[in-house]
Amino acid sequence: MAALALLWLMFAGPFWQEKKPVDWTDIEVSQLFAESPWAATVGPPSRNAAAPSVQVYIATAGPMLAAEKERERRLKARRKPGEPEKDDPLAEEYRLWLEDNLASQVVLAIRLNPNAQLSQESEVRHLEEESFMQVGKKKFKMTGHFPPTPTDPYLRLAFPRPDMVDEKTALTFSFYAPGLPLPFREVQFRVKDLMVNGKAEF
């Protein structure tokens, strides 16, 4: 029996593929945002640079969409009786935009608490002009962005969704994060690692 159990564990798929989101543990939900194929911790360009790393994830991937909804559901369920729900129109604006644009856009979420530099014209210009997604040899310019909000501490960058991707290629995001020391960062996701039931999820 022990051998059969071990064999089952060896061939079982990851929890986001084998279980419904409502059955994920809190640890598993956290793992999706930190240690899954769609998430990464991005350090400064130089290993010798003294600057903090930043957490990023592909927010439009199916498992990440499910994780965001499940995280929000659990936060609401754990709200104390009588505690008012925070009104966050900017976060609602992103949700409504995503409903209309999910099929045509890829969104990279960057954990970046609100800061004054996000509203500086020069910093926003750097963000808009120097953030790209590259798939193979093709480079895609950012189509828009959503700043972090009181209830959503992520800067979200939108890029056009490529028509065709090959499992041998990678998605490389080069971005400028205002308010972050050494704000130019780069992260790469291999398409073969983003497959769920034979489909690339990003």
Image (spheres, rainbow, N blue to C red):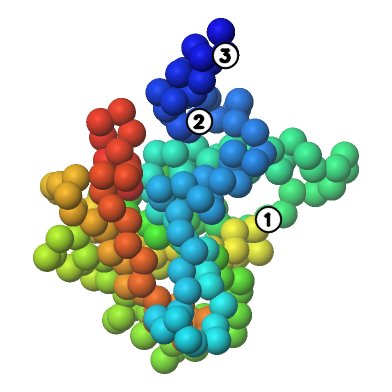
Q: Which residue is mark 3?
A: 2
Q: Residue at x 65, y 41 (%)?
A: 27
Left or right for 153, reference 59? right
Vertically, is 20 above or below 117?
above
* Amino acid at the residue labelled 3: Ala
* Amino acid at the residue labelled 2: Phe
Left or right for 1, reference 83? left
Q: Looking at the picture, how far across and down is residue 9, in whole percent?
A: 49, 23
Q: CA distance from mark 1 to mark 3?
A: 51 Å
Q: Residue at x 57, y 13 (%)?
A: 2
- Residue 195 in view (yes/no): yes
| Helix, strand or loop at mark 2 | helix
Q: Looking at the picture, how far across and down is residue 174, in whole percent?
A: 32, 72
Q: Which residue is mark 2?
A: 15
Q: Looking at the picture, how far across and down is residue 69, in whole percent?
A: 55, 40
55 or 67, which is in the foreground?
Answer: 55
Number of marks in the rendered image:
3
Vertically, is 5 above or below 55?
above
Q: Looking at the picture, how far across and down is residue 31, in whole percent?
A: 56, 46
Image depth: mark 2 or mark 3 in front: 3
106 or 10, which is in the foreground?
Answer: 10
Q: Which residue is mark 1?
A: 87
- Res 184 → quadrant: bottom left
- Residue 142 in view (yes/no): no
| Helix, strand or loop at mark 3 | helix
Left or right for 14, reference 151? left
> Which numbered disc flags the more N-terminal residue, 2 or 3?
3
